[in-house]
Image (cartoon, rainbow, N blue to C red):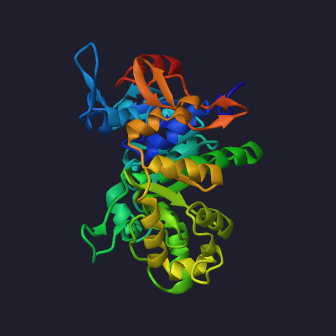
Amino acid sequence: MTKPLAGIRVLDLSRVLAGPWCTQLLADLGADVIKIERPGQGDDTRHWGPPWVEHPDGTRTAAYFLAANRGKRSAAIDLASPEGADQVRRLADASDVVVENFKVGALAKYGLDAATMRTRNPRLVYASITGFGQDGPRAAQAGYDFMIQGQAGLMSVTGLPDDVDNGGPLRAGVAVVDLFTGLYTANAILAALVRRGTTGEGATIDSALFDCGLAMLANQASNYLVSGDSPPRQGNSHPNLVPYQPFACADQPLIIAVGNDRQFAALAGLLGQSGWATDPRFATNAARIAHRADLVTQIEAITRTAPAAHWYEACERAGIPAGPINSIANALADPQATHRAMLREMGGLRLLGSPLRLDGQRMDSDLPPPRLGQHTDEILTELG
């Protein structure tokens, strides 16, 4: 099957994670992604090691870079030079999409801003990713995932309450704001390309880490807007569901995630406490939230009597969502990960693959992450 973005050229002027994550997705869907990098230096994340991949010529690339740059061709071009800026403008003239994540207004001095590029190529979809957007009192400020996790409120609901041991806010273990911003931006680009098919006109997309961080608050923001109370940090328990958290077993914890009263009744029966399903304290989710501490204590007194594997298998048989807390090594070794071919080997590298499938075909690029400037001559020859 021909991939859906075959024939679409994407000029990637971004670096670090949000922009490259966006363009990697477009590459997986079949776009020809040309990554413009600073000569001699490249994307910042090429140097965010260890760990490193060591190359035969003595150079090395950080594992971080490999995570977000498969499927791309790299051209080492100096945007700050008149010749380099002209080359990039000419590449944009022959492209469908530009993605950049420079500070607001930084590319205008090189003639690489949205207004200039779209005047030259009205069909161009130009996406800018910044910390706080193209306007507003914080527009000039830089933005990184960690600070946005704090500033957008995500860390206020991540971690343990202040009044317990090791309490306090925590960032997520991966750069979730960057990743979500990349996905939101890719969605906007795809929508703009669909619209262009009808109108012939491109689009200017304004994506902000801060906006996406706020959007990611989802039910927690809605809880605040309805109640007027900022949700507290509560560790691994859920603000709107009980029981929905890890429970200590004889050897290690097991996550049990009950989403409705039917599942709770099944859990109660499995634990030998069928009466809980009609007990006024526990019969409904609202009642279980009101009596959270009592119920969790009683469940854990039972789960501690057997290993996690015992309860996991029992929950599976009863149709109750449950699962272990795996290390990354264990998660990637899971038979389901193997069956779904989530690990790829390309160019001598072991990488995660795309989770997307269309009509049974994996939406994965076969190009490994490029070496710095690997395709410069090839791309400039195509440009003429």
- Above or below, 71 against 185 in this view is above
Residue 183 percent across, percent down from the top left = 54, 49
Is residue 50 at all visible to an observer of this figure? Answer: yes
Residue furthest bottom in the image: 228
Say if 207 sits above or below 158 in the image: above
Give the residue displayed 44% in from the left and 29% down from the top: 351
Whether residue 113 is visible, yes or no, is no
Q: Position of residue 7 (x, y in %)?
A: 65, 28
Picture quadrant where residue 15 is located: top left
Q: Nearer the viewer, residue 164 or 309?
A: 309
Q: Quick check: 329 above or below 74?
A: below
The residue lying at 75 percent from left, 48 percent from top is 199
Count of numbered circles in the view: 0
The residue at the far top in this view is 56
Q: Find residue 350 and report its image quarter.
A: top left
Could you say which is closer to the camera, residue 200 or residue 102? 102
Q: Nearer the viewer, residue 308 or 162?
A: 308
Residue at image point 48% right, 46% down: 309
Q: Position of residue 318 (x, y in %)?
A: 64, 54
Q: Percent x, y for residue 176? A: 43, 53
Query: In the image, is residue 238 above or below residue 280?
Result: above
Q: Is residue 190 left or right of residue 98?
A: right
Quadrant location of the N terminus in the rendered image:
top right
Front in this rendered view, residue 173 or 113? 173
* Residue found at x 62% / y 74%: 275
